[in-house]
Image: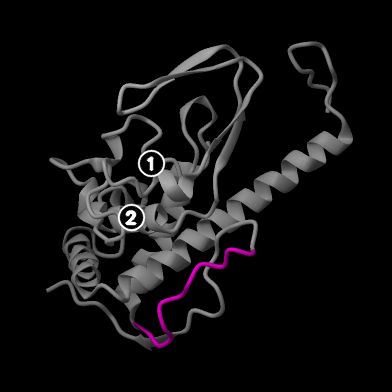
Amino acid sequence: MDSRYKDGRRTTEAAVAGMIIALIFAGKHSSTIVSTWTRACLLTHTMFLDAVVEEQREIMRKYKDNIDYNVLSKMETLHSCIKEAGRMHPATLGLIHQTQKNITVRTKEGSEYGIPKGDTLVNLVMLTSKLSHIYKDPEVYDPYRFHPGREEDKVGGKFSYAIFGGGSHACPGEAYAFLQIKIIWSHLLRNFEIKLTSPFPKTDWSKFVLEPKGKVLVNYRRRRLESN
């Protein structure tokens, strides 16, 4: 409450309350939505579901039930599956920033556009995450596009994959969000057989965040994934 901005202004109670609400909103909705889309994508793509289940078996062979931060970081296939679900179904329509200096933008065709200081820029993540000159077959769920040798998310620079923002204003909770979702899915994959019992959901475009429309229904059957 005693902090100040660079120009000397004090923070207000309303500003602090707004920041806290924004953090809660961003933390809850982004992780929840990406986790739900991951479920829908995995359960409708058997090849990748089998791949993440096999990865869990390998993890159990090496580490048993000692799933800690370092072990979670080794779940590269699961990480890619979550990342791809987020690319295809980003939680936000776009990112809005105000330019702090005059800049020049060059298109892939070579055209240049000058953008003056103070202008507002909008990155439509729902479109940039499906650009065909960056992502091969962008409408296809393909987590392997992020693996070494392809790394399509780096083709167009640091904003090619921006579902959590990018640059100096990237979400500081991105790594935590992926960790959180991996914890959820690692537990589910090791302890349950899961089937999608409702149709693949459509996007609800009426919401501020792009969540699945309607209910995403699944059937759970308890199991114990064997490591052998």
Q: Nearer the viewer, residue 68 or 219?
A: 219
Residue 9 drawn at (x, y percent): 84, 17
**Residue 99 higher or lower than 138, as above or below:** above
* SS state under label 1: loop
Label 2 crowding class (10 Å Cα cut-off): few <14, some 14-19, many 20+?
A: many
The picture quadrant where one finds residue 102 is top right
Q: Which residues are magenta?
A: 195-206
Report the side of 109 relative to 54 (left or right).
right
Q: Position of residue 174 (x, y in %)?
A: 47, 43
x, y (%) of residue 221? 36, 88
List x then y, in percent, for residue 145. 22, 49
Q: What is the chief secondary structure element of the magenta stretch?
A: loop
**Magenta residue check for 8:** no
Closest to the observer, 69 or 106: 106
Image vertical order of residue 99 relative to residue 14, above or below: above
In depth, the one of 162 and 113 nearer the eye is: 113
- Quadrant of the drawing holding the C terminus: bottom left
Give the residue at x 48% y 72%: 202
Residue at 42% in and 51% down: 179
**Kind of residue at badge 2:** Glu
Side of 217 relative to 142 (left or right): right
Q: Residues within 10 Å of mark 1 (few under 14, many from 20)?
A: many
Q: Say which quarter of the image contains residue 64.
A: bottom left
Residue at the spot of label 2: 84
Between 60 and 19, the one lying in front of the other is: 19
Instruction: Indicate the amino acid at tag 1.
Output: Tyr
- The residue carrying mark 1 is 161
Cα separation between marks 2 and 1 = 10 Å
- Report the residue at 83% width, 26% height from top: 11
